[in-house]
Amino acid sequence: MQTEKIEGKRAGDVYYRIKHPSGLSICLYPKEHSSTTYAVFGARYGSVDNCFRRSDESGAQTVPEGIAHYLEHKLFESEDGDAFEKYARTGASANAFTSFESTCYLFSCTDRLYESLEILLSFVQDPYFTKESVAKEQGIIGQEIKMYDDDPQWQVMFSFLRAMYQKHPIRQDIAGTVESIAQITPEHLYRCYRTFYNLGNMILCIAGSFDMEKVLEVCDRTLKPSEAVTVERVFEEEPASVLQTYTEKRLPVTLPLFQFGYKEPVKKGSYRSEEEIAAVEVLLEAMASDSSLLFRRLLDRELINESSFCYEYFEGEGYAAVMFGGESKDPEAVAGEIRKEVSRLLKDGIDEADFRRAQKAIYGENIAALNSTGNIANALLSFSFKNRELFTYLDALADLKLSKVQEALKRVFGGEQTVLSVINPL
Amino acid sequence: MGKIVSYPISESVSLRAFTDPNFKTMKISVDMLIPISALTAAKYGILPSLVSRATLEYSDYTALSRRLSELYGAALDSSVRKMGAYQVLTLSAGGISSRYALEGEDMFGELCELLFSVLFHPLKTEDGEFVKEHFEQEKRQLLELKDAEFGDKMLYAHQCCEQLHFAKSEAGVNRYGSREDILNLELSGLSEAWEELLKKSHFEIFILGDCEPELSVFRERFQGLGSSFPMTYLKMDPPSEVQRKTEEQTLSQSKLSMAFAVDFRPEERLAFQLMSAVFGGTPSSKLFRNVREKQSLCYYCSSVFDAAGSTLYVESGVETENLVRAEEAILHELDALQQGEVTEEELDAAKLALCNAMRSVRDSLNAVENFCVSRLFDPVLEPPDELVRKIEALRKEDVVCAAKKVVLSAVFSLKGCANA
């Protein structure tokens, strides 16, 4: 078992990265004064993984949309009962979620950690599907899909992604569609489970108060070594251009919602470094946070409000975009102001004082996030899946140079490929 | 390990400190409680965001935001919520601990200065009014917040149900007042309204996280503020009949929101919380296991006990054709609970979940503040560990007895149609 101690001098914390003999990567972040311990067990398998190639097979396979999310629902059932019933006996608060690139099972507890950990590791490694149980789940997932059909925030986001991406599966809904989930069979579920729930493709992250030896004892007892198989995501090549520059839907809302963003050309298989991510975070803070001139102009023109305006660097394997969103009486005018600001910045660059201020703000927010065991464990997991390290990111933020932000500015906005997605009232 | 320590400043001002160097942040928060009324809800509701828009030193929104960014993304927040029959207006300042400040800033001093500035010296013009542009901006944003609530169908259904349930009580007044009341707000008089709030509110001050507060400064600043008045859980007459309303909208999924009147004494509060956990508060609850999982009637179906408002709510997302069946199934589960159908497993699971949530309180500064404020109506503030001990001692009979005091009061159905 290889154990590496990772020290974060700025955070004043340490954590341990362990390669377990089963193939699983484990991150353990002690916070001995915390009452709560949070554990997350995740697979690098999300809604984008509908076409894949296993290292022990020659061809790629395509499966219906929505299987990662369907599996998340079904894994909670096993021959000897439901995982929630087992957690009910330890008092842990459990949940799971599927994102574009990962599926995560988690719990937080203040007592009986090792029992809950055993439940987590066991049920995720123990798939049990029958034709009947798969068919029954279609009703529940169908209801979930309908709930999101009515959610204006969700709809403005997915309309945006479908307009921005021509081929990349990021444009598909995480839960799939009522039609695609009707095609899912137990065989599909077992096939995808055996491909992606390989311990070499998974991570366990725990933050909180625990005895490292006891955690590893549970791991030794419950982890079943996986085959030495790797899996490759197969994506069609994504053009640099967007599919549509404008998309619109109508829903029962009072004020229009918008999502406006820039598509960044991304090389296949490349990941952005800690420094590159830090540079974009600082860039967006300098450009659009509530201390920016752009924000002030939008507010003074009554085009946005403080409670809904937001922005994000949305990136993963094969995709990257800067997105701005919120409610506005005139989404076109918001997009126009953002375009103007991007042009100005591309010409003049980011001001030194704006950069310093933004850097301090993002650094503070990241330090503050280390209060929460949930934030820590989830960050360790998502950083690991993207080949990044948490404390390296904090150092990159604190040591960031303005020149790196100027480079990021050209990289994320230079392509000038934009999409405006709008939800209008009925 | 931090402890919640109370320092009464006066009859109307309490200060509670929860300091712990294991946090990487600190927060100073001032909660002002005042009885809610349709006449004043909008006027008071706009004030926290209006006074925190700028300060004497940073007299412009952007200048103040820039100062907060320089303080490592510190937050100067305002919020308005409702707790039973009271409006709770909060102003707070939060940021990282001084030990993480790269340039050695005294974060506690800086945050206190900003918070005191907006509380005691909000920016006004020469004629003593707030700045007109700031007022117009806040008024517009408040109206847009109201509009956004219509877009969130879970929230919308809940609010409509709450209005039906509290139709005859001030507790039914929206936390910001009605849309019309906000539209009719005028700048003149708001400055006096702020002074009125400082004089008439009950104050709860919180100093939380990694900091070493100088209590004398707080005593000096807050002594003489506020008014003392009795604060109690809402008392309501039992509903004579169930209020019902159905609204149709163009939606894929319908929402069913139900309110139950609850008659409880303060010392019974934990039994009602446990009853709600058994009924619909956890994934092992009756509503989740039977209505959602076994009968597949709802995508979500859960209960929450609002102690301050003496109400139990059940919220669910339902297929339109299942609206009636879902309501029947929910009432069937309540009836079973009232008849004493509670297994040892159900009771133990609910107790463990509730104790787990209670023990987690001290891991979050916001949770500590919410815990204390939500227990203001209790005769004494018992710490979370003591409440854990009391929950563990509750018996099945306590849960069944609590369930028997739950009476259906209002049902709101938001009916999804293809073309409403």
Image (cartoon, rainbow, N blue to C red):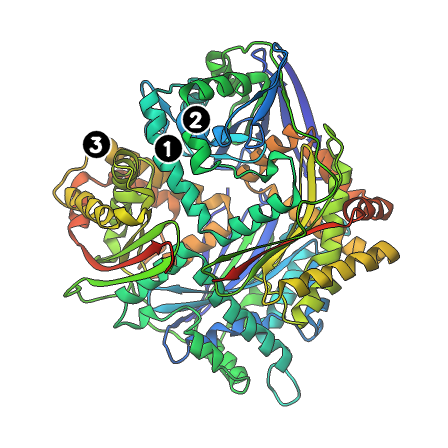
Taking the spot 48% from the left edge, 28% from the top edge, the residue there is A67
What amino acid does circle 1 point to? Gln
Using the image, name the chain to which the residue with label 3 belongs: B
Q: Is label 1 in a helix, a strand or a loop?
A: helix
Q: Nearer the viewer, mark 3 or mark 2?
A: 2
Residue nearer the viewer, B258 or A242: A242
Is there a contact, CB below 8 Å, between mark 1 and mark 2?
yes
Q: Residues within 10 Å of mark 3 (few under 14, many from 20)?
A: few
User: Can residue B70 be seen here?
Assistant: no
Q: How many marks?
A: 3
Question: Quadrant location of residue A407?
Answer: top right
* Residue A254 percent coordinates (x, y): 48, 65
Q: Is label 3 in a helix, a strand or a loop?
A: helix
Q: Which residue is mark 1?
A: A138
Q: Which residue is mark 2?
A: A184
* Residue A376 percent coordinates (x, y): 58, 36
Mark closer to the chain start, 1 or 2: 1
Taking the spot 32% from the left edge, 29% from the top edge, the residue there is A85
Residue nearer the viewer, B299 or A226: B299
Taking the spot 70% from the left edge, 67% from the top edge, the residue there is A296
Above-or-below relation of B342 to A419: above
Q: In whole angstroms, how far apart are the C-alphas of marks 1 and 3?
A: 32 Å
What amino acid does circle 3 point to? Glu
Residues tagged by mark 1 and mark 2 found on one chain of the structure: yes
What amino acid does circle 2 point to? Ile
Instruction: Tell whether A8 sits left or right of B161.
Output: right
The quadrant in which the N terminus of chain A is found is: top right
* Residue A280 percent coordinates (x, y): 75, 46
Above-or-below relation of B149 to A96: below
Q: Which residue is mark 3?
A: B344
Taking the spot 29% from the left edge, 63% from the top edge, the residue there is B233
